[in-house]
Image (tube, rainbow, N blue to C red):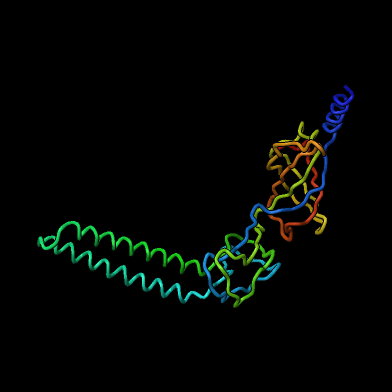
Amino acid sequence: MKKIFLIGFLITYIFAQDEISSRAVITSYDKTILSSELAGNITYLKKIEGDSFKKGDLLIKLNCDIYKAQKSKAAIEKNIAYLKYKKNKKLESFKSIGKFEVDIAREEFRKQEAEYKIASINVKRCNIYAPYNGRVVTREVSQHQSVKPNEQILEIISTESLEAKTFVPSTWLAILKKDMKVVLNIDETQTSISAVVKEIGSVVDPISQTVLVRVSLEKPYDKIIPGMSATAIFQINEQN
């Protein structure tokens, strides 16, 4: 009975406030590790920890000589298969060969077409481009180093889709709503950023009696990077 009374008192107290606050950390929606799908020697790798890049920038380049040669070979074999198929089609029209030989030639041509597509894909895999605007977190290898397929090269993080994560008392669930306005006071830059509640956690931690709240930062937010700390101030009486 006392616990119910205490919870009710806390909720009443919270509603009486104009704002409530909690500690938060800045994170990014997008974080990934770039690796090579091919074995090869790295001929281009300029970015190091902390460097920024734009979407579409060339980040990694492998020596592509062997893959280009394989593509040229596949193109020649595809052309030969096509010529054989055309020849058999013409011979069939003269009743010199049967349908079976034509079908075999056609399927051989299709097989070589597929081989050419695979070779073309491998050539494209020699260059790895930035999937979004971001920064380098860690670099695992060096330029001119040989790598194996799926070996980690760069860990990158997006700087264009930032959010803040905070754990708040579960009693706040009575007033927290999606799209609620939030002000983030960033410790490191001593600046304030506008934000809104994006998602409220689906479970309450039974030990700490807290729930995760994800807050989406509103642009612009220059000089704000993942890992920074902030105080999240929830604007209770300023709903969108």
Q: Which quadrant would residue 77 be assigned to in this image? A: bottom left
**Quarter of the image with the C terminus in it:** top right
**Quarter of the image with the N terminus in it:** top right
Q: Residue furthest right?
A: 2
Rendering coords of residue 24 (x, y %)? 79, 49
Look at 72% across and 59% down and name the residue there: 222
Q: Is residue 207 above or below residue 223?
A: above
How many numbered marks are there?
0
Rendering coords of residue 120 (x, y %)? 42, 67
- In the image, 12 versus 119, the foreground residue is 119
Rendering coords of residue 37 (x, y %)? 53, 64
Look at 36% across and 61% down and name the residue there: 114
Rendering coords of residue 18 (x, y %)? 83, 37
Q: Is residue 106 above or below residue 143?
A: above
Look at 17% across and 62% down and name the residue there: 89
- In the image, 229 versus 43, the foreground residue is 43
Q: Residue furthest top?
A: 1
Left or right of 130, for residue 5? right
- In the image, 71 versus 198, the foreground residue is 71
Q: Which quadrant would residue 226 be assigned to in this image? A: bottom right
